[in-house]
Image (cartoon, rainbow, N blue to C red):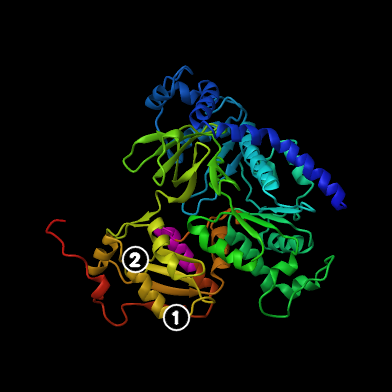
Amino acid sequence: MQNKFMAGILIKLLRAACFPTNFRFHRSLADPKIAQQDTYWKIMADFAQTDYAKSFGITGDENYKEFAAKVPIQTYEELEPWIDRQLKFPTAKVLTPHKIVHAEPTSGSSSSTKHIPYTRKLVNSFSNLFGIWAYDLLESGLKLETGRIFISVSPKPGNPKQKAFQSDKEYLQEPLKTLASQFLLTPPATDDAAEFQHALAMTLLSDERLEIISVWSPTYMLSILDYIEQNRQTLQKSAILRTLPFPEEGPIDWQRVWPQLKLISCWDDASAELAANQLKKCFPGVRIQGKGLLATEAPFTVPLSDAEGCLPLLNDVFLEFEDSQGVIKRLHELTDYEQYQVIVTQNSGLTRYRMNDIVEVRGFYSQTPMLEFVGRANAVCDLAGEKLHEEFVRNALTPLLSDSFVVVPNCEKDLGYTMLVDSRTLANQDELAEKAEEALCSAHHYKLARFQNQIAALELQLVENLSTRLQEFHQADGMQLGNIKDTAFINDPAKAARLLAFINEKRQSNQPLRVSLLEESSAPHQGFLQPEKQEVGS
């Protein structure tokens, strides 16, 4: 793409290619019940041909109630033998009648890597998501001149079962794939993380025409900015096609680096909210748009500008929702401001698959509920009966901080929790430690466990460049760099122990600065820590 004229033509072609999918999607929002029913029957036609369906006596004629009565809701672990068999025999009709084109590894923050089978139909679902998103941006007044876009790309470990996607453009079908490729900034391919990080920084810095950045995690983008700041002299000396507007020291004015940047697309809800707010401070004149709910297993929601929220991809996935009482509901049956666990049936063999994601209905657009991700259903830690949940930890502690943090169980000495905080942004660690402990004690079971000395007081540990250190740890722990999810809470004690060891190793000879509320006393504070009067046996 050599000039604005050519870019304008390509943008018009992209808009035209996205129009049919967008039109169908908006028309379906007026009647989600009918749209989901159509999606159900299309998926059922494929599902009925599989060995998995036949094991439950499915013929393909079952209505939804009959289908739900026969086929159980399953987790990845319960489906894993079937998935392994499908990956071993890509053309066999184990979970899907369609050929498996590859297996995509997940990047979960708290569990081992899973391998999700992909068919062309599932790839098409992701492509539809991109088409709706791109058309909406172009129609909402985003005035693009060059169309230059960076879409998250990260090196991925070799997968002996199948070849994984090497860039996000692989999620697109033609003609979107070819059209989008004309606008993409693509760093050189390498499996070495250090080489990739340098190559990525050089690629981004080489193009001042960049207009859109699309990453999954805002922490990932912050780590790129941190790398550039820490290595500015080396990057300036490298062969590059323009003079970099870098001061010798101090903060970099990122809007001078990319003066045409107009949009950053990333997660901005739940645990990603703090990091997204940091990006806003780095790019005060740039629109930050939340991605909605998007997982390796399937695309779920897409942001719409007019709706000011995220709508479900009701033509591509069949969705069920479990409420707090365990009742299963369909999309058209959801209630405003209620929370639900997501259960998905998609186009690649995952049927009635429990995502362990919790969403909340945040109003309606047309006749369809808008969904916002609020946390993980299984993100609970219970060392001594305190039952801490990620959503509670995030909501309790986020008001106390303006930067990233993470709370982890720490069983190295006494049972308890450690809160990792960025040392560069913390003014008063004693005050934060006290307020954080008070906030956690608003949870009854945590307060009771503290009062009974079952767990120690919250410990504060300061970490320089915390976001970058977390990125490094998760990558070393087997996750893909670009897809690392922000989290305010790690509930797995074993993973937490690995993180704390990693952080302390990075400190080398420096001793970590820890702040504990207990000081020299082993007795819990009274005041806010004193539990309510308990009845015997409660």
> Residue 344 at what x, y percent from top left?
48, 36
- Residue name at image x 38 percent, y 58 percent: 392
**First reached walking from the N terminus: tag 1 or tag 2:** 1
Direction from residue 287 to residue 273 in the image, left or right = left
Characterize the local packing of mark 2: few (<14), some (14-19) or many (20 or more) Cα atoms within 10 angstroms. Answer: many
Residue at point 32% right, 69% down? Answer: 414
Which residue in the rendered view is the most extreme toward the bottom? 520
Which disc, if any, is residue 367?
none
Q: Is residue 70 magenta?
A: no
Residue 320 appearing in the image: yes
Q: CA distance from mark 1 to mark 2?
A: 18 Å
Q: Which of 324 and 377 lies nearest the eye of the viewer?
A: 324
Magenta residues (range): 489-501
Q: Is residue 492 found inside the magenta-colored segment of the image?
A: yes
Estimate the x, y position of residue 418 in percent, counting from the top left: 40, 69
Kindly identify the residue that appears in the image at 50 percent across and 54 percent down: 109
Report helix, strand or loop for mark 1: loop
Q: Which mark is residue 428?
A: 1
Q: In which quadrant will I find the C terminus? A: bottom left
Is the residue 435 above or below the residue 374 in the image? below
- The extreme left residue here reads 536
- Three-letter code for the amino acid on which mark 2 is drawn: Leu
Question: Is residue 2 depicted above or below 235 in this figure?
Answer: above
Q: Residue at x 51, y 55 (%)?
A: 269
Tell me the quarter of the picture where residue 313 sits: top right
Image height check: is 40 above or below 159? above
Mark 1: few/some/many CA within 10 Å (<14, 14-19, 20+)? few
Dots 1, 2 in contact, CB < 8 A: no
Q: Which mark is residue 440?
A: 2
Quarter assignment of residue 207: bottom right
Percent position of residue 275, x then y: 55, 63
Q: Nearer the viewer, residue 163 or 245?
A: 245
